[in-house]
Amino acid sequence: MSENNLYENFPIWIPILIIFVSIITYIIGAFILIGFGIIFSILYLIYCFFVEIFVVLRSCKHCYYYNKVCGFGKGKIASLFLKKGDTKKFIDRKITFSDLIPDFLVFIFPIIGGSILSILDFSFMRIGLIILFAIISFGGTAIIRGKLVCKYCKQSKIGCPALQFFSRKK
């Protein structure tokens, strides 16, 4: 892909779409977990919030899109709260499976919790929500990010540890 096809700032509709999909996913996850009680849903939403904050703290301040409109909508947010980091730290960072566990738990909690609740008290609505959650979480997110973000991202061309991890480039 040529440098001309990469975004300096992403069109605003892309991060809005990705943020919307993330929020919808978190809400569906919380709704699935409400069968354990409202406190579990609230704790889940708080956990999701902190996972997002952790990404901004650990990655966004070092990214090329710091103080720019990135595909995920966090470049501008990072610049509001954090000083610019070192882009080399972002490029040189190696992601391992253990680094991704907090992100995976955002998706695992509702699926396992919903499965347990379905065994204890079967509900077609809950099963439907689990399926919808899985489709949006895994399929929708992968398609949106793959088709709309990573292929147009300047940071991915400079060096992105997530892209390297998922594409198995060494």
Image (cartoon, grey):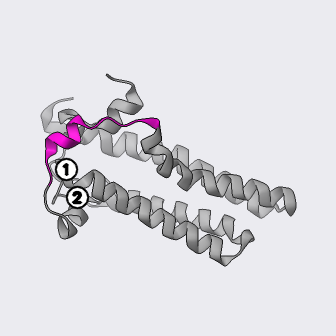
Left of 154 or right of it: where is 145? right
Rendered-image quadrant of the C terminus:
top left
Name the residue carrying label 2: 75
Q: In which quarter of the image is residue 19?
A: bottom left
Residue span colored magenta: 85-97
Where is residue 113 shown, x and y percent of the image? 70, 58
Amino acid type, callout 1: His
Whether residue 63 is visible here, answered yes or no, is: yes
Neighbourhood count class around disc 2 (C-alpha, 10 Å): few under 14, some 14–19, many 20 upward = many
Q: Which mark is residue 62?
A: 1
Q: Which of 62 and 155 is in front in this view?
A: 62
Q: In this view, does 166 lie to the left or right of 136?
A: left
Of the two numbered discs 2 and 1 on the same chain, state the one appearing first in sequence: 1
Q: Residue 141: image x %, image y %?
A: 47, 48
Image marks 2 and 1: residues in contact by CB distance under 8 Å:
no
Residue occupying the point 24% across, 56% down: 11
Separation (CA) of disc 2 from disc 1: 10 Å
Viewer can see residue 14? no
Helix, strand or loop for disc 2:
helix
Coordinates of residue 100 in the picture (x, y in percent): 45, 44
Q: Outermost residue toward the front? A: 98
Amino acid carrying mark 2 in the image = Gly
Q: Is mark 1 on a helix, strand or loop?
A: helix
Which residue is located at x 16 percent, y 30 percent?
A: 2
Asked whether 47 or 129 is in front, the reply is 47
